[in-house]
Amino acid sequence: MSSAGKKKLILPLVLLLGLILAGLGAHYYINHLLTRPIKLENIEVDDKAALKLNILEQISKKNGITEWKLKASSATLLKDRNKAVLKDVDIVFYTKQNTQVLLTAARGELDTKTHDMTFSGNFIVRYQHYSLTSETLHYTKKPHIIRSDSRVTINDGNSVIKADSMEILLNQDLIILKGHVEGQLSENSQDSNIL
């Protein structure tokens, strides 16, 4: 065999040997990465939580009639308490006339046995063109009532009504304002009942 023929044979053999060595090296490195134990660092364990859900959707019905539909971006079910701590809450409450009362809140708590709820932090209640704000808001499932024991403000864009506390009786389509009720009414307000 001539030297030119030997060079043509040696070059592919050297390339083949190089590829085999590179493949063995890659196999060893990948195998080493996969079999090495994983170290977990900076793990936070919530010892009060029994379960944490990224998204919660729940519907409450009574005698086949939908009372409310709830959506939350996260829910933490607490151990030793029948509570779920909710974040970024959207709820649609239904009145006896099947009209919708919308509530959005930054956070809330749901009693998992009674389905009573408490809301705080940047919440707004909307009904038609009216909006209601307060510091805290409570929903009691059995009588189907929304109430606030802190100062409330009802606004329709033109008129404002304030009171020390209020109750929305959803089964009776009625809102009751209590204590130091004051308001500024405008002729431009909608000619409609609040509920």
Image: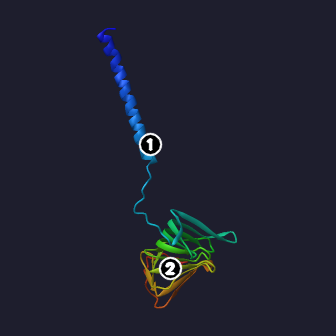
Q: Nearer the viewer, residue 106 or 131?
A: 106
The percent position of residue 154, horizontal first and vertical second, equals 46, 79
Looking at the image, residue 43 lies above or below residue 97: above
**Hey, which quadrant is residue 3 in on the image?**
top left
Give the side of residue 4 with respect to residue 112, left or right.
Answer: left
Colour treatment of the image? rainbow
Horizontal relation, residue 7 to residue 193: left or right: left
Which is nearer the N-term, disc 2 or disc 1? 1
Q: Quadrant of residue 40?
A: bottom left
Secondary structure of the residue carrying numbered label 1: helix
Mark sitting on residue 153: none
Query: Would you say the residues marked 2 and 1 are in contact, meaning their CB atoms lie under 8 Å apart?
Result: no
Q: Amino acid at mark 2?
A: Leu
Q: Nearer the viewer, residue 84 or 158?
A: 84
**At 43% across and 63% down in the image, what residue appears?**
43
Q: Amino acid at mark 1?
A: Asn
Residue furthest to the right: 63
Q: Disc 1 designates what residue? A: 31
For mark 2, does the 10 Å Cα neighbourhood hold few (<14), some (14 to 19), or many (20 or more) residues? many
Q: Nearer the viewer, mark 2 or mark 1?
A: 1
> Among all residues in the image, which is located at the extreme bottom?
180
Q: Nearer the viewer, residue 135 or 130?
A: 135
**In which quadrant will I find the N terminus?**
top left
Task: Give the Cα separation between the discs numbered 2 and 1.
Answer: 57 Å
Circle 2: element type = strand
Residue 53 versus residue 15 in the image, above or below: below
- Residue drawn at x 40%, y 33% is 23
In the image, is 95 to the left or to the right of 129?
A: right
Question: In the rendering, at what x and y percent does residue 141 appear?
Answer: 61, 77
- Please report the residue visible at 44 percent of the width from the left and 66 percent of the height from the top: 44
Residue at which label 2 appears = 137
Residue 30 in the image: state x and y as whole percent.
42, 42
